[in-house]
Image (tube, rainbow, N blue to C red):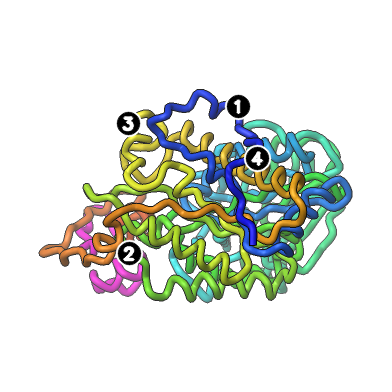
Amino acid sequence: MRSITAIFILFVFSAHAQLPSELKIDSSFAYIQGYSAETLSRLKHQFDAIDSNKLVILHYGGSHIQAENPTTVARNLFQETFGNGGRGLLFSYGAANTYSSINYSSTFTGKWSYNKSYQGKKQELPLGVCGMVVETMDTLASLSFGMKKAIAANQHIVTVLYEQDDRAMKLEVKVNDSVIRAMNFIPQGVSFAWTDSIRSIQLIVKRGEDTERFRFYGIHVEHEANRGLVYHSTGVGAAAFRSILILEKLPEQVPVINPDIVILDFGTNDILYENKIDAKLPFEVEKAISWWRSMVPEVLIVLTSTQDLYYKKHPITAGVLFRDLMDSLAKKNDCLFWNWYDLSGGLNTIRTWATLGYAKSDHIHLTKSGYQVKGGLLYTSFMNTLNALGKEKPMNELRIPLKEYQEHIAESLTPKPTPKANSYYIVKSGDTLSAIAQRNHTTVATIKRINGLSSDKIRVGQRLKMP
């Protein structure tokens, strides 16, 4: 069985040429690794057939992905190389009370309730493909999307994903202020054709007879032609790996997306606060893999590692263990693997990234420059793998040995001391329990439990105990 070594031409994103050596980026890991000839062959075939069979990538993750910083770079590079198959998914982050994509604004009128995957399953607000859901009962509520750069004119197919049942309010759709007259009703919502550029989309909901709510899951924009590449970016801030398992509407919405490659880019919120691997995590990862294959049998799944992290004056050494786990689970379950941990420098490098302006001072998130590096290297990793597969005879394995880091396991498994006292948060105007939970790295359920709250209602000046 053959493994790949660093003997192939490296497709380096041009902006990387001047990167400081202090970042310790190791380009020998800039590959999408695979563990069977069949999986690697399928990956190559998908890109080889892209002129006659559209390739769809669906990228899940946490806060690193929600704003679309690295995925916008990757999307642009992929589409420059393989052709543009469409914009992909949009979501109303404004109505969900969270930050929006760097590519568009999302505003709203009326009162909306919401749920996000990190908050857990809610029977009254089931989650969909974007990992979030918003709902209104207002008679004249609306959702608006303003593109910071217009989506270029093409033969677009636009699908509005919403709960299409007897309780659903009527929907009026405007594109660039023009009302859409011809819409096709489908089980997942409505779809329509649009040939001009797209500068804005507005959804206006109106109560009809015997209707009571509008529940929105996202907008999908792709080209009608079956060629090119579509890159969906569906991040949810604070989401851990288990969040992918509670997207109840995913099975019915997946046929609209029809992904060929699903990137499961989690980990930060799984290891950051305890600096260890939870015993349930391997089960959750394998359950997610099985679930996706039950929905899309031919889908290729890419598991990723995190970047180095530093939290509360301590290195998060469990990043090494998470890397090892994702590598082993990818091999066991015949998935692909992107070793971002070693590629981005490995253990004890995130503070240098921050010093040089590529990571934020929290030593968790990257800056715009840092995310540009990550998105470019993700594209580069795919290109290097495709280049390797194109030059060689069918490969049984494309695997790069993991870096070794000394004295990381013992520290990862050492329990952190239990805090002697709780901290407190004073509720400010505009606060919600979900926003407070996200800022304090906990859940709404936990805050309600330790404060004896029976509902989500809070008042300005209220003193809330934090775990």
- Nearer the N terminus, badge 4 or badge 2? 4
Is 112 situated above or below 100?
A: below
The outermost residue toward the left is: 420
Is 22 situated above or below 74?
A: above
Residue that carries the numbered disc 2 in the rendered image: 276
Q: CA distance from mark 3 to mark 2?
A: 26 Å
Q: Is residue 386 visible?
A: yes
Q: Residues within 10 Å of mark 4 (few under 14, many from 20)?
A: few
In the image, what residue occupies the spot 24% across and 71% down?
A: 450
Q: Quadrant of the N terminus?
A: bottom right
Residue that carries the numbered disc 3 in the rendered image: 355
Q: In terms of secondary structure, where does tag 1 sit?
A: helix
Q: CA distance from mark 4 to mark 2?
A: 36 Å
Residue that carries the numbered disc 4 in the rendered image: 8
Q: CA distance from mark 2 to mark 1?
A: 36 Å
Q: In terms of secondary structure, where does tag 4 sit?
A: loop
- Nearer the N terminus, badge 3 or badge 2? 2
User: In front: 316, or 28?
Assistant: 28
Q: Is residue 115 visible?
A: no
- The type of residue carrying mark 4 is Phe
Residue that carries the numbered disc 1 in the rendered image: 14
What segment is highlighted magenta in the picture? 443-467
Marks 3 and 4 close (CB-CB < 8 Å): no
- Nearer the N terminus, badge 1 or badge 3? 1
- The type of residue carrying mark 3 is Thr
